[in-house]
Amino acid sequence: MNYTVDNKEVYENFDWSNLKHKDLADKIIKVFDIIPDDVNTIADIGCGNGVITNALNKEYDVTAVDRSAKALEFVNAKKVLASADSIPLPSYQFDMVFSSELLEHLDDKTLAGTVEEIKRLSKKYVLITVPNDENPDKLQIKCKKCGYKYNRPNHLRSFNMDNISEIFSEYKVLKSFTFGKKVRYYNPLLLNIKTSVTPSSAWVPYFWIGKSNRKTICPSCEYEFTNNYKFNIISSFIDTINAVISPKKPYWLFVLMVKR
């Protein structure tokens, strides 16, 4: 599935208070571990509610950038309300530009502009974290109103070392590693069969997304609904086959790069 809709209103209506330091504590430790010793100033692009930003701001001079005014209310660092592809800050101002779980949310045009802005702002380093070679169709749901199909966390694309290296070709990779809870990959062929022959209510089981976290907003028509799961024997059978043939892998990919 080719996802294309990135709707700002989805993030303005997101409950940012639910994401807390304890949810990302292990990841934050890894972020601190990988930052080079000569870094003092950091731009955090697409900072969200600042869970990582606020931790970094205790040790570094951090400027946070996000397009969601609601998310920035939780940020304790210097902050700029702006889209990641058009940031009103001077070039080469930061020792390191950091972006965590942003790039996978962007449409093609915004991604291209964001990558250029990251390069423009960085004096030396870029640190990127993204989901590790995920299949966004795994968490595909269907809007009950307009029928638009989209990834539940609003991921539009997948990243791995090959395409990160390609879009940051002017940079040399200093360190890269995968980290986090292991998540099972979903075979694309099996997933295509599953979403073609079973109802959308059977696509995302409760053990993937819990009952308390099923509210969603369609990025196409902005209809808010609860995506409840309903057991389907065919869907469950295909999930079982996938569990046998598909490996689990750490959820995040970390890539630290330096300007050539």
Image (cartoon, rainbow, N blue to C red):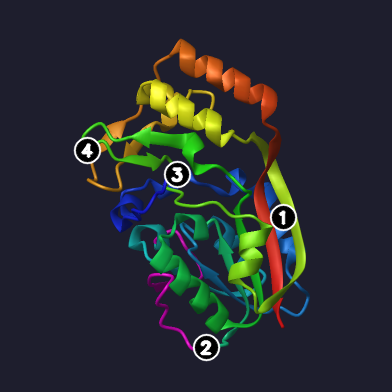
Whichever of labels 1 and 3 marks the residue nearer the N terminus, that label is 1
* Residue under pointer 3: 153
* Residue under pointer 2: 91
Q: Position of residue 74 (x, y in %)?
A: 44, 58
**Which stretch appears magenta?**
73-91
Q: CA distance from mark 2 to mark 3?
A: 32 Å
| Residue placed most toward the observer, 103 or 212 | 103
* Residue under pointer 4: 146
Residue 220 forms part of the magenta stretch: no
Give the label on residue 29, or none: 1
Q: Residue 93 appears in which quarter of the rendering? A: bottom right
Residue 87 forms part of the magenta stretch: yes
Check disc 1 and give the amino acid type: Ile
| Residue placed most toward the observer, 53 or 233 | 233
- Helix, strand or loop under label 4: loop
Check disc 2 and give the amino acid type: Ser
For the residues bearing labels 2 and 3, Cβ distance under 8 angstroms = no
- Helix, strand or loop under label 3: loop
Whichever of labels 2 and 1 marks the residue nearer the N terminus, that label is 1
In this view, 149 is above or below 195: below
The N terminus sits in image quarter: top left
- Helix, strand or loop under label 1: helix
